Image (tube, grey):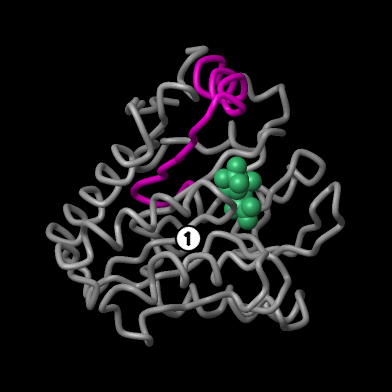
Amino acid sequence: MNNEVEIFKNVEGIADYFAKMIIYREATSKNNFVSIALSGGNTPKKIFERISEKFSEDINWKRIRIFWGDERCVPPESSESNFGMANETLLSKINIPLENIYRIQGEKLPSNEADKYSELIKELLPINNGFPQFDIVMLGLGDDGHTVSIFPSSIGLFYSSKICEVTKHPETGQNRITITGNVINNAFLKVFIATGNSKAERVKEVISTADKSKGYPASLVDSDFGKVYWLIDEEAASKL
Ligand code: 6PG
């Protein structure tokens, strides 16, 4: 797997680089829209805040469609909601048409919503290599090597033939809806973002060993098509 690893002093540097990736993608895409799947959790918060502060006028949001790589099965106003976090830190602060925002409806019955979101993605995205194709999929890295909401205990879902699956967080039992590995790997740009010392060991294992036998779903993200980027800070890179 040829990863492009970019190391930054701080999260602002990561955010600026990621924003410029979006700007470049939008400027060069021949499609009517650039489709981006956002990740959730804590890491993206500072990224989104920085982008809303510094790049709100630099990105042509009218051509950007926002999706999610995964969502917790909670209402949008829940502090757990990935949509809620992105809305608070970015979407409510930029001039993006509301019709360009396609949230996973975490408040709905998970199995029904997973099917509905799969159909939505299929309808709105170009289909290449037999799967919907995102321009950019933003990815986080869990301490257990999970990404989106594909956990080691359900790593088989990475290669599901479905576009979205329902999973459960292994500790909390919280239902999640997640896009699957074939959709992730079909994206032009797979952009992992990781910061902090707590990620250093896993970042090293996933990037340098590329040893799929460790059972980390993040290790299955590949660049057979498109590119895999790692945007990490010096702490997360400290064991490379
Ligand atoms: C989620 C995410 C998940 C996240 C990782 C890292 O819904 O939680 O999509 O895959 O990216 O767990 O989370 P942190 O950024 O909070 O470390």
Q: Is residue 176 above or below residue 194?
A: below
Q: Is residue 157 left or right of residue 25?
A: right
Work out whether residue 148 can be spotted: no
- According to the picture, the residue beneath numbered tag 1 turns out to be 130
Which percent across, then down, holds residue 57?
Answer: 16, 67
**Observer-nearest residue: 86 or 66?**
86
Where does the magenta region start and end? 185-210
Q: Is residue 206 highlighted in magenta?
A: yes
Query: In what element is the residue under mark 1?
Result: loop
State the image quarter where residue 204 is shown: top right
Q: For the residue marked with disc 1, what is the amino acid?
A: Gly
**Observer-nearest residue: 173 or 164?**
173
Q: Is residue 146 above or below residue 59?
A: above
Q: Is residue 113 above or below residue 34?
A: below
At 41% from the left edge and 36% from the top edge, which residue is drawn? Answer: 223
Mark 1 C-beta to ligand 1 under 8 Å: no
Q: Is residue 141 highlighted in magenta?
A: no
Which percent across, then down, holds residue 195?
Answer: 49, 33
Which percent across, then down, holds residue 47?
Answer: 39, 50
Q: Label 1 neighbourhood size at 10 Å, few (<14), some (14-19), many (20+)? A: few
Work out whether residue 172 can be spotted: yes
